[in-house]
């Protein structure tokens, strides 16, 4: 068997394995999302809309709720609106919750994969095997290290973080697609003709408009997403300004749409009210910067020491070495790569500084890991390309063999092995019926509240949402007078509800 044929077989095998890995990783999350149940803030977001009939009435309630949140809690003008409008506790119940959470998971992966795919196109990666492998590597970081249950298995988490992050990535992807489409070809019209140029210009304009709209919606969310989307859009604007030696008006317009939404978000009176409530001590700018750096280091250790991201990083270096070799790295790409490396800081800082804390919950951590996945994945490809470019031809093959050997040793030595991969653990839980059983029992209990209207209800349920591993389950406090318990009681017309389970 000659060398060329061996390479083709190896390439095809890697392609098939990457496709199968994508199906398993994404499929696990999609299936598990179908067993999401109502949790905590879902009831808070529904409280003003309980009993609302008809779409028009629910729209009014959603606007009113969004205004209330903006004035008294935080500046999430878009996510509080959709969190009320599409709340299954107001309309639709369990079937609607399944649909919404499934769509959230589909959008999350579609936005990540489309962004990576378009970015690879801009880097002129032509190999189908390389593209699919890189897509699988990016997905593995999101599904292999953490379940991110506050994103995929919690309605409010999906509304405030999942959906807007997806919209933000779609906005960035559309902005990438819009640039460089000046002479796009259409099946009906040749772009070399005046009619073709008009059609291409119209399509390009539409991409910019959609990017601006989606970006404006995305930044009306958690401050972690607001800062992230604005920074990535700005990075692309700077990249094309250097590349084309001019600032593009349409690129600037997309950035201004995002930045304007960010200002609306940041100026919300509710942000300052929440800061006073959640921060027990004064929190200076220096504290914010210090804590941001500390949290970034924590995330680095989590990826490279607690997990096996070192293997992913090295595999992407090898991929860049092979598919991007012998290419000169442009100055604008270097600047873009450096700006992307700053994205994690932009993600973390608004959260820590805005809420006066030194940590981030799982839902914000998801945003951070997504952007680190992008930034470090891009860095690895660039390092691989640079190595291939600076090495002499007779040193390239030994260097590639050495890199592959180090990868094999690292993969074998890392304590975070295949038995630890979260999506595989969740597959086992699905086979054992853990998520299904939790869904069935929770649904039966909540449906049973319909026969208890006006009563004082006692239930024995979890005290913490993480009782089911890698998932978010219904839970309740021991205090019937808490706002949380009151929201649940109101949703089902109960006089009161209390949890009789005690802490272990």
Image (cartoon, rainbow, N blue to C red):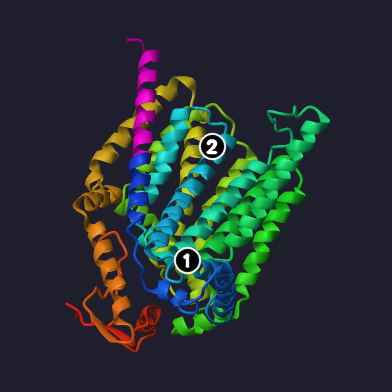
Please rate how many residues cluster around mark 1, counting C-alpha atoms within 10 Å: few if below 14, some from 14 to 19, many from 20. many
Left or right? Give the position of 424 relative to 281: left
Q: Position of residue 499 (x, y in %)?
A: 25, 81
Circle nearer the viewer, 2 or 1: 2
Q: As rendered, which of 74 and 322 lies closer to the eye?
A: 74
Q: Is residue 197 above or below residue 145?
A: above
Mark 1 lies on residue: 292
Q: Is residue 152 above or below residue 199?
A: below
Q: As rendered, which of 313 and 351 lies closer to the eye?
A: 351
Q: Residue furthest top?
A: 1
Judged from the image, the secondary structure of the residue bearing numbered disc 2 is: helix
Left or right? Give the position of 212 relative to 112: right
Judged from the image, the secondary structure of the residue bearing numbered disc 1 is: helix
Mark 2 lies on residue: 120
Q: Is residue 133 visible?
A: yes
Q: Is residue 443 above or below residue 504?
A: above
Q: CA distance from mark 2 to mark 1?
A: 30 Å
Q: Position of residue 305 (x, y in %)?
A: 31, 52
Q: As rendered, which of 27 and 142 lies closer to the eye?
A: 27
Q: Quadrant of residue 66?
A: bottom right
Please rate how many residues cluster around mark 2, counting C-alpha atoms within 10 Å: few if below 14, some from 14 to 19, many from 20. some
The answer to whether residue 4 is magenta is: yes
Q: Position of residue 182 (x, y in %)?
A: 74, 36
Left or right? Give the position of 309 relative to 275: left
Rendered residue at 65%/69% (across/down): 263
Q: Is residue 130 above or below residue 333?
A: above
Pick whichever of labels 2 and 1 is earlier in the sequence: 2
Image quarter of the C terminus: bottom left
Where are the magenta residues, as a range? Answer: 1-22
Secondary structure character of the magenta stretch overall? helix
């Amino acid at each position: 068997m000659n060398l060329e044929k061996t390479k083709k077989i190896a390439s095809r095998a890697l392609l098939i394995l990457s496709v199968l890995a994508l199906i398993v990783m994404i499929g696990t999350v999609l299936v598990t999302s179908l067993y999401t149940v109502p949790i905590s803030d879902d009831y808070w977001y529904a409280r003003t809309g309980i009993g609302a009939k008809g779409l028009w009435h629910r729209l009014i309630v959603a606007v009113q709720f969004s205004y209330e949140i903006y004035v008294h809690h935080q500046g999430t003008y878009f996510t509080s609106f959709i969190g009320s409008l599409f709340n299954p506790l107001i309309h639709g119940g369990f079937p609607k919750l399944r649909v919404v959470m499934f769509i959230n998971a589909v959008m999350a992966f579609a936005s990540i994969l489309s962004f990576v795919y378009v970015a690879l196109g801009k880097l002129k990666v032509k190999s189908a095997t390389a593209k699919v492998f890189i897509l699988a590597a990016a997905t593995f970081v999101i599904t292999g290290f953490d379940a991110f249950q506050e994103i995929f298995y919690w309605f409010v988490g999906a509304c405030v973080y999942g959906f807007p992050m997806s919209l933000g990535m779609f906005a960035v992807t559309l902005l990438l697609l819009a640039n460089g489409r000046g002479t796009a070809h259409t099946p009906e019209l040749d772009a070399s003709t005046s009619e073709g140029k008009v059609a291409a210009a119209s399509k390009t304009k539409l991409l910019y408009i959609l990017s601006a709209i989606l970006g404006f919606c995305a930044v009306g969310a958690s401050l972690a997403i607001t800062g992230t989307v604005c920074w990535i859009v700005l990075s692309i604007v700077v990249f094309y300004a250097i590349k084309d030696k001019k600032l593009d008006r349409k690129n600037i317009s997309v950035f201004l749409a995002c930045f304007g939404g960010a200002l609306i978000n940041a100026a919300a009176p509710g942000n300052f009210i929440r800061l006073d409530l959640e921060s027990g001590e004064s929190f200076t700018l220096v504290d914010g910067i210090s804590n941001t750096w500390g949290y970034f280091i924590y995330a680095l250790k989590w990826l490279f020491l607690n997990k096996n991201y070192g293997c992913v990083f090295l595999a992407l270096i090898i991929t860049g070495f092979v598919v991007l070799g012998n290419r000169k790295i442009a100055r604008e790409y270097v600047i873009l790569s450096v700006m992307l490396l700053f994205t994690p800081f932009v993600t973390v800082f608004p959260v820590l500084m805005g809420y006066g804390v030194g940590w981030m919950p799982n839902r914000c951590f998801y945003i951070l890991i997504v952007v680190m996945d992008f930034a470090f994945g891009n860095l690895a490809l660039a390092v691989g390309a640079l190595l291939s470019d600076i090495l002499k031809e007779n040193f390239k093959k030994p260097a590639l063999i050495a890199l592959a050997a180090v990868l094999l040793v690292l993969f074998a030595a890392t304590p975070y092995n295949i038995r630890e991969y979260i999506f595989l653990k969740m597959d086992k839980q699905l086979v054992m019926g853990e998520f299904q059983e939790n869904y069935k029992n929770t649904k039966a209990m909540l449906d049973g509240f319909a026969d208890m209207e006006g009563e004082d209800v006692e239930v024995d349920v979890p005290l913490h949402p993480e009782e089911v591993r890698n998932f978010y389950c219904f839970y309740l406090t021991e205090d019937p007078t808490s706002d949380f318990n009151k929201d649940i009681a109101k949703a089902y017309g109960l006089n009161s509800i209390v949890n009789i389970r005690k802490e272990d």
